[in-house]
Amino acid sequence: MSSLLLQSDADFLVHDTFTADTEDNEDHTFNGVMFNVMVHKNQKRPTGAVVIDAVHVRGGLGKMTVWKTEGGFEGKQLHASEWTQLYKGTLEPSWGTLQKLKLDPAIVLLPNEKIGLYVHSNEDNDEGIVYDNQRSEKTHADDYITLLPGMAHLASEPFSDDGPWWGSPWRRRRQFVGKLSYGVRYKLWSPRNGFCFPRCFRRGASSSFAALAMGWQGLPTDVVLYILHLCRYDWFDHPDLSDDEEDKEEEHNSSAQPLADTPCTARTYASRATWLARLRARVSLDYSRFDHISDNSDDDALPVIHYPVDMDMIDDDVDDDDSEDDHDGIM
């Protein structure tokens, strides 16, 4: 298998599952609540997608529906045609326990995407769903998603502008009460998207490639690349260190004196640094050795792809004189 054919995104559902729980002050109950959900780009994890598969609420419930709209709910509360229904069912009243509303299909969101969610009960009273007054700029925020405050709906008909009293049935500065169940799908490593992965993983991948693929007795290059391709982003993390502690350890190691030479390394630190720089360039940047590989459906050779240099992969200690060597030494 060529590294050019390694997929960037997993085709299975999720790697990890989480719940986004909100505060519950039981300020109000009525027919519905509308709010936004944002997926933010995680700086320490190569997030490929977030999959929201269920909404959990409590209250008088009854005939329930859940809807979503792309880009947020603002200006769409009266336009049912701009929403997609994800759940419809009837639930018994549940005041003490959150009830699960399974979404079909599940919502798949990419980093930096935003959607509007609308949870509605058509009970002909004011006890359908529990929700709260807005207390902060964010209802919930974690490493992957943020729930924002929204609006409450005081009408038994979804998207209706006819409320039980005079004036608009929409109440601003309200927030969702309950939780969302979601999973995270991480990107799969390949030389092309290695920059998305933590520095610890990138260094571990380079070291593993050196240990497993270099030399006459090493494994075939594509076998090693495929092994690394299926490693999680945290495969090379220290088991006893948190993310912040690991960052400090990385910073300390980068400023420490080099280890003593061994038979497996070059005789001087300068030459060893040069060798490592060449190796990392080979793993991350050089694709010309795959030019002869053809797709099964096409006899033409795959095009050469040029990728931006990841400066974290190149040691600062490499001498300028060594950088002038031709590329034949690292092909």
Image (cartoon, grey):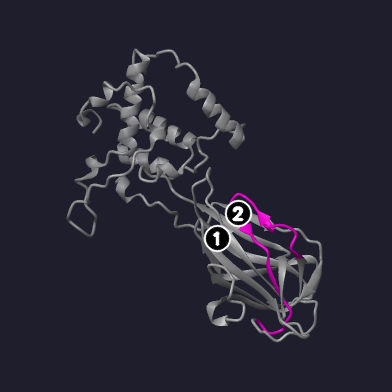
In the displayed structure, 231 sits above or below 50; it is above
> 10 or 280: nearer the eye?
280
Mark carried by residue 222: none
Query: What residue is pinned by disc 1?
Result: 51
Secondary structure of the residue carrying numbered label 2: strand
Q: Where is residue 326 in the image (x, y as percent from the top left)?
A: 20, 28
Q: Are marks 1 and 2 in contact (CB under 8 Å)?
A: no
State the CA–CA distance, disc 1 to disc 2: 9 Å
Which mark is on residue 17? 2
Residue 190 vertical placement versus 252 (above, below): below
Task: Report whether residue 1 is seen.
Answer: no
Q: Which of 102 and 318 is in front in this view?
A: 318
The image quadrant of residue 119 is bottom right
Quarter of the C terminus within the rendering: top left
Please report the residue visible at 49 percent of the width from the left and 43 percent of the height from the top.
232
Q: Which of 119 and 235 is in front in this view?
A: 119
Closer to the N terminus: mark 1 or mark 2? 2
Using the image as rendered, state which of residue 82 and residue 300 is in the foreground.
Answer: 82
Whether residue 153 is in magenta: the answer is yes
Secondary structure category for the residue under label 1: strand
Instruction: Give neighbour class at mark 2: few <14, some 14-19, many 20+ (Cα, 10 Å).
Output: few
Q: What residue type is labelled 1?
A: Val
How many residues crowd mark 1 within 10 Å: few (<14), some (14–19), many (20+)? some
Disc 1 versus disc 2: nearer the observer: 1
- Extent of the magenta region: 133-158
At horizontal 35% and vertical 13% (from top left) the residue drawn is 268
